[in-house]
Image: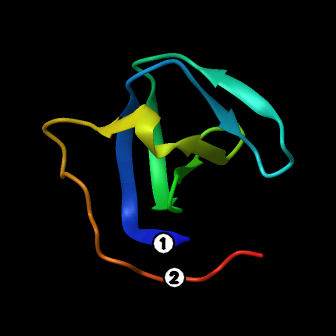
């Protein structure tokens, strides 16, 4: 998992699902904004700033918000999850 220096806002470009660490799936509509804090090779780790679940979405299903600060590729911490 590679973590970003700060929360980056991404938007879903297709209807997708957020998958929690417990394996629950939550549908996410196209156009929804997500707070991304890190990436695996295939997924983005999304956190909620409200009382919604945290989890993973496919990297191919999201795009950075235009006009924002852009993608930050600086790494805070990198570790292998088991």
Q: Which mark is residue 24?
A: none
Pick whichever of labels 1 and 2 is earlier in the sequence: 1
Tally of marks: 2
Q: CA distance from mark 1 to mark 2?
A: 5 Å
Q: Residue, x 67% and y 47% (percent of image)?
A: 55
- Horizontal side of 8 relative to 56 (left or right) equals left
Q: Which residue is mark 2?
A: 78
- Horizontal side of 46 relative to 53 (left or right) equals left
Q: Which residue is mark 1?
A: 2
Please, what secondary structure does the residue beneath circle 1 have? strand
Q: Residues within 10 Å of mark 2 (few under 14, many from 20)?
A: few
Residue 65 visible, this orientation: yes
Quadrant position of residue 57 = top right
**Relative depth, front residue between 49 and 15:** 15
Q: Does residue 66 lie above or below 7 as drawn?
A: above
Q: Does residue 47 lie above or below 53 as drawn?
A: below
**Relative depth, front residue between 9 and 12:** 12
Screen quadrant of the C terminus: bottom right
Please, what secondary structure does the residue beneath circle 2 have? loop
Q: Residue, x 53% and y 16% (percent of image)?
A: 29
Q: Residues within 10 Å of mark 1 (few under 14, many from 20)?
A: some
Q: Position of residue 48 (x, y in %)?
A: 59, 43
CB within 8 Å, label 1 to label 2: yes
Screen quadrant of the N terminus: bottom right
Quadrant position of residue 79 = bottom right
**Relative depth, front residue between 7 and 18:** 18
Q: Residue, x 84% and y 43% (percent of image)?
A: 23
Q: Position of residue 33 (x, y in %)?
A: 42, 31
Q: Position of residue 4 (x, y in %)?
A: 40, 68
């Amino acid at each position: 998992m590679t973590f970003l220096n700060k929360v980056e806002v991404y938007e879903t470009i297709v209807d997708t699902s957020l998958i929690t660490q417990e394996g629950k799936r939550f549908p996410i509509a196209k156009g929804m904004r997500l707070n991304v804090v890190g990436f695996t090779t295939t997924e983005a780790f999304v956190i909620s700033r409200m009382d919604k679940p945290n989890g993973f979405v496919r990297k191919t299903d999201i795009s950075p918000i235009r006009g924002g600060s852009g993608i930050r590729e600086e790494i805070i911490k990198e570790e292998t999850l088991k």
